[in-house]
Amino acid sequence: NARNKDSGGAEVGICLPLTTPDTAQTHVPDLAPPPDLTGTRLLLAEDNPSCRELARALTRAIGADLTLVEDGAQVIAALTSGPLPDVLILDDEMPAVTGLQLLHWLRAQGGDFAALPVLALTSHIGVNEINALRQAGANEVLAKPVLCPLELGRAIRRAQGFDTPAPQSPA
């Protein structure tokens, strides 16, 4: 289930079964392995503790180095006080400074800030929300919750411009 919090941000809960009936008889198709992003530096802004823990597990699976912050103000502090990450991943709904506000700020700075690849995560998968994030400067937009290292790894690569973009939603 997913809900928007009155204080800003979104809260997502998932429930996964520990076992499935007839697991031995179910054919699971072979999936491509997730991209190896060893050495890729990611900065993730996510206000939900459960989503941060999920992101930690997913980025570990793809080999990326992850720095976690809880809101847009902490993103600005991290970006202005140290080396830039290879990719910024941000939640679109955070307290204090939203992902959309952060994108506008980032792109207005010019230089390396304007060129920083950004992957926006959103629980709003409507065309208007996705288009607003892209128009503000997101290189890639992914619906939350992200549950698969392959999906996250490919989206990070697309944000960096290394892989073919995902199909666009009709306008």
Image: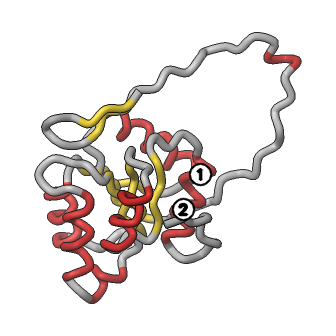
The answer to whether residue 29 is above or below residue 17 is: below
SS for dot 2? loop
What whole-number distance in Å separates the C-alpha atoms at marks 2 and 1? Answer: 17 Å
| Percent of width and height locating residue 154 | 60, 60
Amino acid type shown at disc 2: Ser
The answer to whether residue 13 is above or below residue 168 is: above
| Percent of width and height locating residue 58 | 51, 44
Q: Earlier in the sequence, mark 2 or mark 1?
A: 1
SS for dot 1? helix
Q: Are marks 2 and 1 in contact (CB under 8 Å)?
A: no
Q: Nearer the viewer, residue 168 or 68?
A: 168
| Percent of width and height locating residue 158 | 55, 69
Residue at figure coordinates x 79%, y 17% from the top left? 23
Q: Nearer the viewer, residue 144 or 47?
A: 144
Amino acid type shown at disc 1: Glu
The answer to whether residue 21 is above or below residue 115 is: above
Q: Which mark is residue 48?
A: none
Pointer 2 residue: 169
Q: How is the image coloured?
A: secondary structure
Residue at figure coordinates x 39%, y 44% from the top left? 123
Residue at figure coordinates x 44%, y 44% from the top left? 144
